[in-house]
Image (cartoon, rainbow, N blue to C red):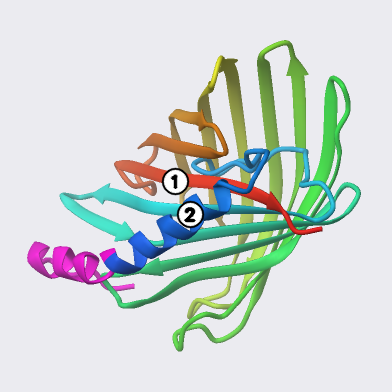
């Protein structure tokens, strides 16, 4: 996707969508007032856990902002949306949607499922997503699948993900691998985390990022933030994420 160098154009594009973001935030707060539990899904991280939503529970996560700084240029993505729905024991539907205001179009979309068997100490599972064509530039679709593992010990959790992808949407087909490691420490209403993420498209350098994150429980609403630094030339210099999340029972 092309980038605009005019900072005022970027700010104007974001300002035009502030009412929509406000409406989305209001809807999530309204849903939170009826939700007895907070969501357990994992933005602002790239990793996921070996757990699923209970049957009938809808998990809503809204990305208020993702900002990527690279070569003295900042790129914004907002809003972002992640929706999970538990459909059976240990199985949930997973969906993702992103909007890029600089380009005035959807940036990414995916739909799939996660199957996981959580244990007292070790949980394992599989997450598979269909990568959807969401713009006229996309000439096909794709698939991404990864194994997920969660280790628990007291207030500490360690999540490990590894898998591959095949994507026909870009002009040139992309295939490769991705992996991540996320450690979390629960302290009262806060969950402090540190993540290492790596991804490689075949024939290109490895993209690697690492940094801290925070999930803060505010009753039925979670505030989620992270700051990741690029470790390789392929990665953005800095990526900042800000999310809110909640959940409610549909049946």
Q: Label 1: state its secondary structure.
A: strand
Counting from the top left corner in percent of width and height, residue 123 is at 83, 31
Splitting the image into 4 quarters, where does residue 185 fall?
Answer: top right
Q: What is the CA distance from the residue labelled 2 to the residue labelled 1?
A: 6 Å
Q: Is there any visible trace of residue 202 in the rendered image?
A: no
Left or right: where does residue 93 sit relative to residue 76?
Answer: right
Assess whether mark 1 and mark 2 are in contact (beta carbons under 8 angstroms).
Answer: yes
Q: Residues within 10 Å of mark 2 (few under 14, many from 20)?
A: many
The one nearer the camera, 4 or 247, is 247
The one nearer the camera, 29 or 210, is 29
The structure residue drawn at horizontal position 75% and vertical position 59%, both measured from the top left corner, is 250
Q: Residues within 10 Å of mark 1 (few under 14, many from 20)?
A: many
Counting from the top left corner in percent of width and height, residue 247 is at 64, 48
Q: Is there any visible trace of residue 234 in the rendered image?
A: yes
What range of the chain is rendered magenta?
Answer: 1-18
**222 lies above or below 18:** above
Residue occupied by mark 1 = 243
Q: Is residue 8 magenta?
A: yes
Residue placed furthest toward the top? 154
**147 lies above or below 94:** above
The structure residue drawn at horizontal position 46% and vertical position 37%, both measured from the top left corner, is 224
Left or right: where does residue 69 sit relative to residue 12?
Answer: right
Counting from the top left corner in percent of width and height, residue 165 is at 66, 60
Please tell me the numbered disc located at residue 62: 2
- Where's the C terminus, which quadrant? bottom right
Which SS type dominates the magenta stretch?
A: helix
């Amino acid at each position: 996707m092309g980038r605009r160098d005019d900072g005022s154009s970027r700010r104007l594009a974001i300002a035009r969508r502030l009412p929509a973001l406000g409406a989305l935030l209001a809807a999530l707060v309204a849903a939170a007032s009826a939700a007895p539990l907070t969501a357990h899904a994992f933005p602002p991280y790239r990793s996921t856990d070996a757990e699923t939503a209970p049957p009938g529970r809808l998990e809503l996560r809204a990305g208020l902002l993702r900002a990527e700084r690279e070569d003295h240029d900042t790129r914004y993505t907002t809003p972002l949306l992640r929706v999970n729905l538990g459909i059976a024991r240990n199985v949930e539907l997973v969906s993702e949607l992103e909007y890029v205001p600089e380009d005035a179009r959807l940036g990414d979309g995916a739909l799939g499922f996660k199957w996981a068997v959580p244990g007292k100490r070790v949980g394992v599972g599989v997450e598979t997503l269909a990568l959807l064509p969401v713009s006229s530039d996309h000439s096909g679709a794709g698939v991404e699948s990864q194994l997920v593992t969660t280790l628990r010990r007291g207030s500490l959790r360690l999540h490990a993900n590894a898998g591959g992808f095949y994507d026909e949407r870009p002009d040139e087909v992309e295939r490769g691998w991705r992996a991540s490691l996320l450690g979390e420490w629960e302290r009262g209403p806060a969950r402090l985390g540190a993540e290492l993420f790596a991804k490689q498209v075949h024939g290109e350098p490895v993209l690697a990022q690492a940094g801290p994150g925070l999930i803060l429980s505010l009753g039925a609403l979670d505030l989620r933030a992270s700051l990741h630094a690029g470790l390789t030339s392929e990665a953005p210099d800095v990526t900042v994420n800000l999310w809110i999340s909640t959940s409610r029972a549909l049946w």
